[in-house]
Amino acid sequence: MNFLTIKHLMLAALIVLSRPAFALHIMLDPGHGGIDTGAVHGQAREAELVLKVAQKLKTLLEKDANFKVTLTRQLDKNISLPHRVKMAEDAKADIFVSLHANAALDSRAKGVEFFFQNNLPPDEDALYLASQENQALLNSKELHKISGGDNLSKKGDVAAIIEDLHRQNRLQSSLRLSKTLTSVWSTDATAPQATIKQAPFYVISKTSMPSVLIEIGFLTNPREAKRLLNTEYQSDLAQKIYTALISYKEKMDNHTAKTLD
Ligand SMILES: [Zn+2]
């Protein structure tokens, strides 16, 4: 059995292991809470707004047998970032979705942003934001380091391959989820522009499952702040995220079925 065969076998095993048994477990994370209000601008309070959207999304997900949903907080209380991650890990959630609202010095800044990140060490943040070619370079260097360089033991090989497959699987799934979200936004002409970004946010860096952090809009943009305070718009946001999660699950299920054929 050569190196590549081992890698393929492990990839197949990983896909089987990462396949949701029945319902896709979503850990929904409304950002901030309690003394940590998040961004505040006029009437708009980030912690309050994201909790409202999360509760609406929870209601939609609970009615659907394809999903299981847990919230990191249901009340206006402060929960540390490591605790949010721990909740997702302990629950063995399949997907982590963190909800936030943006603020900028420039009141013209607007739109919805989807952030995802893989498991690079924090001191590599600057490189992480670099071009795709630099990213590829970093990954191969990292793998080299994890696997113990040139003096590989057989065990080192295997550990490095598993580590790499986990990282690639998580990164690809997070990107797929972000793309699915933007495509839902782009089909609605009245919706604000949606963009995918990468940044070293704690909750999406430390969770081991595919994760996305959604900035639902800019509180500092008067038009967006007005919309975000509107209950119907909050429902629309929840519905869009729900639609994207349905589509993501379908893609994952099809992908798994095809890979295992
Ligand atoms: Zn926030």
Image (spheres, helix red, strand yellow):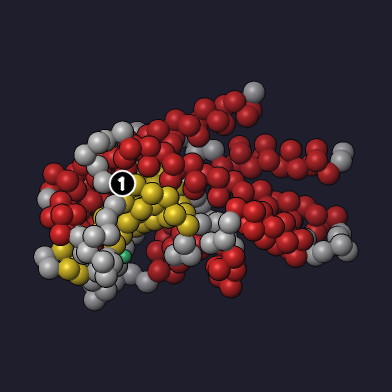
Depth check, front residue: 248 or 12: 248
Q: Residue at x 57, y 31 (%)?
A: 256
Mark 1 neighbour class, 10 Å CA radius: few under 14, some 14 to 19, many 20 or more: some
Is 21 on the left-hand or right-hand side of 155?
Answer: left
**Element type at mark 1:** loop
Residue 213 lies, in percent from the top left, at: 39, 56
Depth check, front residue: 94 or 199: 199
The reply to whether residue 99 is in sight is no
Depth check, front residue: 94 or 108: 108
Is 123 on the left-hand or right-hand side of 222?
Answer: right
Residue 26 lies, in percent from the top left, at: 39, 47
The reply to whether residue 35 is in sight is yes
Residue type pointed to by label 1: Gln
Residue 175 lies, in percent from the top left, at: 49, 46
**Figure quarter occupied by ligand 1:** bottom left
Q: Residue at x 63, y 29 (%)?
A: 259
Residue 133 drawn above or below residue 65: below
- Quarter containing the C terminus: top right
- Give the residue pinned by disc 1: 193
Q: Residue at x 50, y 62 (%)?
A: 205
